[in-house]
Image (tube, rainbow, N blue to C red):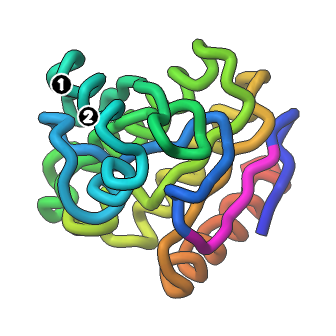
């Protein structure tokens, strides 16, 4: 599923983010940038030691912020590491922090003149964010960014399983309907 917003194509796909050939892929990192489980571990394994060396030099990344490293052995030239919030019932500013993680990743891509970026479902794994709400926030942030900025031609959401893809698709359709009807 895909839609054009301003000059940006926003697309959803099921797959393995470590296989993406966009200019940058986004890593759902931890604050210590230390590698870990899920997509974080997969990116570090596939990307090799170069990414970890750069992460160690950077040191850390607060929740809602993003930093950039090379892509190491990945097809993507860069990895944008962002820290999404751990879901604690929705009362600890999680929504704002999740939107910040997406917005800061897009800002870094734009600042580095990267024309394409692939996102995983940030905070939806071990951080426990409810997928439908995370999808709505992620896609809303990307639609808003694409409407206000130029330069990024492709924002792709690479979703790790069919269930997550279907939930993102439902939320994307709702947001596009609202976007196209001026809401």
Q: Is residue 39 left or right of residue 89?
A: right
Q: Position of residue 95 (x, y in %)?
A: 33, 48
Visible residue check, residue 72: yes
Quadrant assignment, res 121? bottom left
Q: Say which element carries label 1.
A: helix
Picture residue at 32% right of the left edge, 28% below the top: 65
Quadrant assignment, res 48? top left
Q: Measure the C-alpha gap from mark 2 to mark 1.
A: 6 Å
User: Callout 2: few (<14), some (14-19), or many (20+) C-alpha neighbours within 10 Å?
Assistant: some
- Foreground residue, 55 or 130? 55
Picture residue at 50% right of the left edge, 86% below the top: 163
Q: Is residue 15 above or below residue 27?
A: below
Q: Position of residue 60 (x, y in %)?
A: 17, 25
Q: Say which element carries label 2.
A: helix
User: Callout 1: few (<14), some (14-19), or many (20+) C-alpha neighbours within 10 Å?
Assistant: few
Q: Of the numbered discs in the image, which one, if any, rests on residue 52?
A: 2
Q: Furthest-bottom residue in view?
A: 163
Q: Is residue 169 left or right of residue 58?
A: right
- The answer to whether marks 2 and 1 mark residues whose Cβ atoms lie closer than 8 Å is yes
Q: Position of residue 168 (x, y in %)?
A: 57, 71
- Foreground residue, 9 or 44? 44
Q: Is residue 157 magenta?
A: no
Q: Of the numbered discs in the image, which one, if any, rests on residue 155?
A: none
Q: Position of residue 109 (x, y in %)?
A: 58, 25
Label 1 sits on residue:
56
Q: Which residues are magenta?
A: 9-15
Q: How many marks?
A: 2
């Amino acid at each position: 599923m895909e839609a054009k917003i301003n000059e940006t194509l926003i697309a959803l796909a099921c797959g393995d983010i470590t296989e993406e050939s966009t200019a940058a892929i986004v890593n759902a990192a931890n604050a210590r940038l230390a590698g870990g489980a899920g997509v974080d571990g997969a990116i570090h394994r596939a990307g090799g030691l170069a990414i970890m060396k750069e992460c160690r030099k950077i040191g850390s990344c607060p929740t809602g912020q993003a930093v950039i490293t090379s892509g190491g052995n990945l097809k993507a030239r860069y990895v944008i590491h962002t820290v999404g919030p751990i879901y604690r019932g929705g009362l600890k500013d999680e929504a704002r922090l999740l939107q910040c993680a997406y917005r800061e990743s897009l800002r870094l891509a734009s600042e580095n003149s990267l024309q394409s970026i692939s996102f995983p479902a940030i905070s939806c794994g071990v951080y426990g964010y409810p997928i439908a709400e995370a999808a709505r926030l992620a896609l809303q942030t990307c639609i808003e960014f694409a409407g206000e900025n130029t330069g990024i031609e492709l924002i792709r959401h690479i979703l790790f399983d069919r269930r997550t893809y279907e939930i993102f698709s439902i939320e994307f359709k709702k947001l596009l309907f609202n976007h196209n009807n001026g809401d």
